[in-house]
Image (spheres, rainbow, N blue to C red):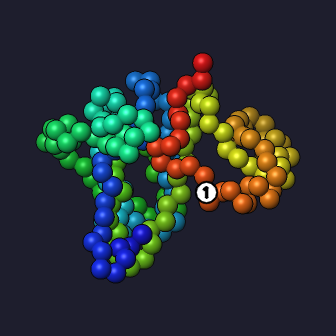
Amino acid sequence: MPAVPGASPQRQPVHSDADFAHPSHQFALVINVPLVSMGPKNGSTEIWLGTHINGVDSQEGAHGDRASGRILPRILEHRRQVRPPSQPVVEKGSLIIRDLRLWHAGMPNLSSDPRVMLAMIHFAAWYRNPMKLQFADDLRELLEAEKGLQVPVTWTSAEDAMSTYLGRSFGNSYDFNQEP
């Protein structure tokens, strides 16, 4: 979002969304779809190419902590000397596909318009993720008709789905750990 009047535009700390013990190989992809064209002026995401191979040892805090996923300053500065980050220009409707483990940061929006982007995480079928989406019962027939589509879901009434969807967890409150 643009900064509120009288406030300085803010950025996120550089972080990885994989702030938990995870495989050393790819297991989840994040798909971002910008709903407006993005660039440095309106805060396109800063990305650190090649950092998907770093583990949780490069991060501050434990899973669930406010600092979880943040990259330790000394490691961040070392990486900056090897390969600095980039902040790409991305057209509206493009697909951005990144490894969940890749270091990145939300950047300040210096424009007066909101920068809106959808984010979806797709896990490998073999990754036993305990998280489930919550969908209203009236979508069940539509989703179950799609053969080959695996949707981990908890069904609820349409009324419950509509009354709770804006109050659900976000950020590091999710648990991506493996089921036994």
Q: For the residue marked with disc 1, what is the amino acid?
A: Gly
Query: Which quadrant is the N terminus positioned in?
Result: bottom left
Residue count near mark 1 (Cα–Cα under 10 Å), binned few <14, some 14–19, many ≥20? few
Closer to us: 148 or 113 = 113
Residue position for label 1: 167
Residue 107's x, y, as percent?
A: 32, 60
Determine the residue positioned at 76% across, 55% down: 160
In the picture, measured across the screen, residue 36 lies left or right of residue 62, that is: right
For the residue labelled by badge 1, is the local secondary structure a helix, a strand or a loop? Answer: helix
In the picture, measured across the screen, residue 71 lies left or right of residue 120, that is: left
In the picture, measured across the screen, residue 53 lies left or right of residue 83, that is: right
Image quadrant where residue 110 sits: bottom left
Image quadrant where residue 68 sits: top left
Determine the residue positioned at 30% across, 51% down: 13
Closer to us: 177 or 64 = 64
Residue extending furthest front? 65
Residue 111's x, y, as percent?
A: 35, 76
Q: In the image, is residue 28 above or below residue 134?
A: above
Residue 65 appears anywhere in the view: yes
Closer to us: 91 or 3 = 3
Residue 108's x, y, as percent?
A: 32, 65
